[in-house]
Structure formats: structure tokens, C-alpha cells
């Protein structure tokens, strides 16, 4: 007799499996998913090769830019021979444009490093700088052409190389970040000491055209080297409205990391540092002329290489000190501003050349302290995800005071025929910057990105089903942030 069956049809095994299969868990939205972050390795062959390449980038780029005075003489002779009016002003404008663009384009360089990659950004920059020097060799007597080749191409290319060379270090080092920043920053000091002698020798043997071709080859050698600039921290970049839009606000939110500007500690730092640089660069430009007027029996030209040498020493020493947990990086930078400002004021009243030498050497030492801490402080304030644009925007803001300060000091000298007023006023902004940076210590540090992402992910994943667990989660997050 066949088995009895009920009136309702029983589901087949495959259908039963489908009906009893658990529903997929609710996933958080794509933009709030936690991002995998790989901690810096703090060593290894590749990491130290990156340090070496960053050292060479800093050295080659700023060795050429800082020693423009050597090329200036040859450019000036060619233009004067060609009968160019206001040749001195036009020659100096090409060098100033190059220096200004190196810092002014740093914000764009940081954005490109985030969205295109550090390797591609630095590689394009090296190619631009190479092209600028190469073409300059064939148009060295033409003012308008030099503005484009030496000023625009070299300056923009240098910026696209310099910013990634700073940012990449934080992707490979954490405990030794201050030390490696000091090592790389020391490259510009060493090359600034060496390059004047090399360039002078080349000018005497192969002329301005051959010298520029050699410098172009030196920059071109950076192209394959910067291919080592690969990020180790994976991050999502700026997050805005996930829906596509053509509005300027949406485009800016996708390109610019707005989160760094919501960080009040970074905001104060990005205002205070440019403020201090209004007078920071004045002694570097007017030192030789000051010695000629105040100490005519002495030669002040060799003070610049000495200043560069002690600056390199300061970058190494203070970079190592910054890695020690008991030293606060921001306080160290405040001390450097305070000392530099005080020494600049002291220059105005110096009546002894040996004392002047001692002041210059000390200024170089604390200049190295200031420079070597830019990268580590940026990583400390905004983290690796925002460091590219944090450094880029800071350097862009610094381009204005670095460009404006020395000409203003020159105007004061033209009216007073003395550097006393210029040096006293130049010493005030660094001191004010050191005081302004005290506000950073009064502002609470924001939660680290990883803690914020875990908090957002937990909130979206739990939904309305786990409201009873929220107080416990908040307590754990509070404890984590307090420990940080």
C-alpha cells in the first residue's frame, strides 16, 4: 500500500536547501569598508634603496636650484652681450620662477601622488625637469625661452619629484622616520656644498651649454630610479558623494583630501609654518652682501657652503632625535623657529666677524632641524593617507613667504642703506610662528583612521538589530582612543 501523503505538496530537497539557506549578511556601503593598511617595514633592502633614491632626488634637484647663482653669471654675460635690456632683472626672474614653482606646485604634486601614484608623478616630474634643462642649453641667451624652459619646466618638474620623495618615506618607515627624513634632507645640503665647485669647473671647460647638458643628464638619471617609489599603505583617498557628478564641488571632493583641513592641529601648523618663513630665507639671500658692507676685509662667499654643511648635520642629528619617544617633534620645530628668529635679530647687531661665523653655523644647524621634521610632523598629524596632500599644500603655502621675504628685505636696504632694520624685522616672523604653534598642543588629536573606520563599519553592519550592544562598542572605542 502506498504511503499516505498530505494535500500540500512537500518541497523537493534542492528547493528545501534554497529555502533554508541563511540570508547574506548586510554589507556596509563601499565607501565605509575598512581599508587594509600594511604597517611600515622600518628596514629591508627595498626600504633603504628608497631612502637612497630620495636622498639623490633631494640632492640633485636642490643642488641645481640652490646654486643658480653660478649659472646666473653666465646667463647675464650672454644677455648683456646680446644687448638685452634689464638683463640682471630678467636673469634673476628665471631663477626666482624656478624656485617659486618648486614650492607652489607642491599641492598639485600631492594630489597627483594620491590619484596617479608616486612613481608616475615623480617620473613625469623628472622627465619635465630633464627637458627643461636640455632645451635651456640651446636657448641660454633668450630671456623669454629661459622663463619657459628653466623657470616653468624645471620648477614644475622639480616639484613633482620633491613631494613624492618626502611622502614615500612614511610608507616604509615609522620608528626611524625622523632619521631617514634627516638623511634624505641632508642630500640637498651635501649637493649644495659640492655643486658650486662642479658647475664652476664645467663652465670653465665646456661653457654654459655643456654645463646645462651635464645637469640635464644628472636629472635624467632620476627617471629610472624613482620607479622604486611604490606606496606601502593602501588607502581610499578622499571620499565624497559616491554618485557621479560634474559639479566643481564634487570634483574637488574627489581630488582633494578635505579631511586634512578638518584636522585643526594640521590647520594651525599649516598657517604657522608659512608665517615663520616670511623672514626665514632673508639671511640666506643677503648674507654675502651683508658681509661685503659690514666686514669688507673678509670674504663672505664661503659662509654659504658652511651654512649648508651645518644644515646637513642638523638634519641628521635632529632627525635621529625626533625618533626618540621622549622628544616631541612639534616642540623641536618650535625651538628651531625660536632659535633661528633670535639669531637673525642678533645678526643686525653683530660687530665681530668670528661671532658672525658662529651665528651662521648655528643657524644652519637649526635650519636642518626645521627641514628634517616637515615629513614626520605631517605623518603624525594626518597619518599616511593624508600625508601626500598635507605636505604638498604646506609647501605651496610656503612658496609665498619664501618668494616675498628677500625682495622686501632688499627694498628696506635700498631705503635705509643698512641691513639692521631688515634683519630685525626678518627675525620676528619665526619667533611668532614658534608661539603660534603652541595652539597645536591645546587641540585634542583626532581618532586614528583605523578606529574611525571600525566604528563606521560596525554601525552600518549592525543596523537596528544590535542597539543593545552600542554602549559596549562605544566604551571599547573610547578606551582605544584614550590609549592612543
Image: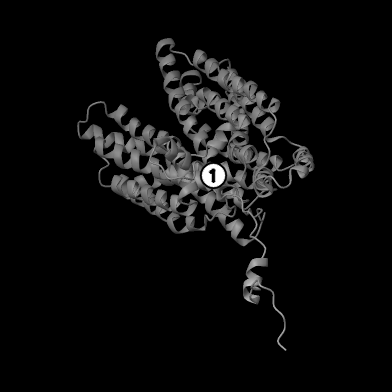
Task: From the viewer's perspective, tell me whether residue 30 is left or right of residue 399.
Answer: right
The answer to whether 194 is drawn above or below residue 412 in the figure is below
Colour mode of the rendering: one colour
Q: Nearer the viewer, residue 137 or 441?
A: 441
- Left or right: 76 as drawn, with respect to 440: left
416 vs 190, left or right, is left
Return the x and y of residue 105 as percentages of the image width and height. 42, 38
The image quadrant of residue 217 is bottom left
The residue singled out by tag 1 in the image is: 190
Crowding at dot 1, Cα within 10 Å, few <14 / some 14-19 / many 20+, comes out as many
The residue sitting at the top extreme is: 416
Total marks drawn?
Answer: 1
Residue 184 position, x and y percent, is: 57, 47
Query: Where, by quadrant of the figure, is residue 434 drawn?
Result: top right
In the rendered image, which quarter contains the C terminus? top right
Camera sees residue 2: yes
Secondary element under disc 1, as helix, strand or loop, is helix
Q: Residue at x 53, y 46 (%)?
A: 237
Q: Which residue is outermost to the bottom? A: 1
Please tell me which residue lies in front, 27 or 168. Answer: 27
Asked if one can make out residue 306 in the rendered structure from this viewpoint, the answer is: no
Q: Residue at x 57, y 36 (%)?
A: 260
Q: Quadrant of the N terminus?
A: bottom right
Q: Write the residue at 32% across / 38% down.
A: 74
Q: Which percent across, then down, holds residue 308?
A: 54, 37
At a point 77% along the width and 37% down the height, the residue shown is: 482
Q: Position of residue 421 (x, y in %)?
A: 51, 13
Amino acid at each position: 500500500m502506498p504511503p499516505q501523503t498530505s494535500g500540500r505538496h512537500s518541497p523537493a530537497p534542492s528547493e528545501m536547501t534554497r529555502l533554508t539557506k541563511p540570508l547574506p549578511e548586510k554589507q556596509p556601503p563601499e565607501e565605509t569598508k575598512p581599508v587594509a593598511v600594511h604597517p611600515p617595514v622600518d628596514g629591508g633592502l627595498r626600504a633603504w634603496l628608497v631612502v637612497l633614491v630620495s636622498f639623490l632626488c633631494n640632492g640633485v634637484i636642490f643642488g641645481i636650484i640652490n646654486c643658480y647663482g653660478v649659472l646666473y653669471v653666465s646667463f647675464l654675460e650672454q644677455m648683456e652681450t646680446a644687448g638685452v635690456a634689464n638683463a640682471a632683472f630678467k636673469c634673476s626672474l628665471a631663477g626666482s620662477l624656478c624656485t617659486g614653482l618648486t614650492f607652489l606646485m607642491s599641492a598639485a604634486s600631492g594630489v597627483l601622488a594620491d590619484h596617479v601614484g608616486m612613481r608616475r608623478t615623480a617620473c613625469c616630474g623628472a622627465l619635465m625637469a630633464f627637458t627643461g634643462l636640455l632645451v635651456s642649453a640651446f636657448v641660454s641667451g633668450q630671456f623669454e625661452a629661459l622663463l619657459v624652459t628653466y623657470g616653468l619646466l624645471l620648477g614644475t618638474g622639480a616639484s613633482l619629484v620633491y613631494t613624492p620623495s618626502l611622502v614615500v618615506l612614511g610608507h616604509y618607515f615609522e620608528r626611524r622616520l625622523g632619521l631617514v627624513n634627516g638623511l634624505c634632507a641632508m642630500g640637498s645640503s651635501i649637493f649644495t656644498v659640492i655643486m658650486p665647485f662642479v658647475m664652476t669647473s664645467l663652465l670653465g671647460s665646456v661653457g654654459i651649454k655643456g654645463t646645462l647638458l651635464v645637469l640635464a643628464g644628472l636629472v635624467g638619471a632620476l627617471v629610472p630610479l624613482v620607479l622604486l617609489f611604490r606606496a606601502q599603505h593602501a588607502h581610499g583617498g578622499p571620499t565624497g558623494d559616491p554618485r557621479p557628478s560634474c559639479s566643481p564641488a564634487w570634483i574637488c571632493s574627489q581630488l582633494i583630501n578635505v579631511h586634512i583641513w578638518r584636522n585643526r592641529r594640521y590647520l594651525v601648523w599649516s598657517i604657522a609654518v608659512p608665517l615663520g618663513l616670511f623672514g626665514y630665507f632673508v639671511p640666506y639671500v643677503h648674507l654675502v652682501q651683508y658681509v661685503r658692507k659690514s666686514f669688507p676685509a673678509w670674504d663672505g662667499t664661503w659662509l654659504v657652503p658652511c651654512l649648508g654643511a651645518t644644515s646637513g648635520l642638523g638634519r641628521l642629528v635632529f632627525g635621529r632625535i625626533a625618533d626618540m619617544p621622549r622628544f616631541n617633534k612639534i616642540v623641536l620645530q618650535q625651538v628651531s623657529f625660536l632659535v633661528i628668529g633670535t639669531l637673525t635679530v642678533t645678526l643686525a647687531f653683530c660687530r665681530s666677524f668670528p661671532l658672525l661665523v658662529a651665528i651662521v653655523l648655528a643657524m644652519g644647524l637649526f635650519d636642518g632641524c626645521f627641514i628634517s621634521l616637515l615629513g614626520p610632523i605631517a605623518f603624525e598629524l594626518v597619518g599616511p593617507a593624508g600625508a601626500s596632500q598635507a605636505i604638498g599644500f604646506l609647501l605651496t603655502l610656503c612658496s609665498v613667504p619664501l618668494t616675498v621675504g628677500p625682495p622686501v628685505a632688499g627694498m628696506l636696504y635700498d631705503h635705509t642703506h643698512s641691513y639692521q632694520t631688515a634683519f630685525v624685522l626678518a627675525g620676528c616672523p619665526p619667533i611668532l610662528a614658534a608661539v603660534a604653534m603652541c595652539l597645536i598642543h591645546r587641540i585634542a588629536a583626532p581618532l586614528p583612521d583605523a578606529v574611525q573606520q571600525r566604528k563606521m563599519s560596525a554601525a552600518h553592519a549592525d543596523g537596528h538589530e544590535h542597539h543593545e550592544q552600542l554602549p559596549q562598542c562605544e566604551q571599547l572605542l573610547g578606551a582605544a582612543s584614550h590609549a592612543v
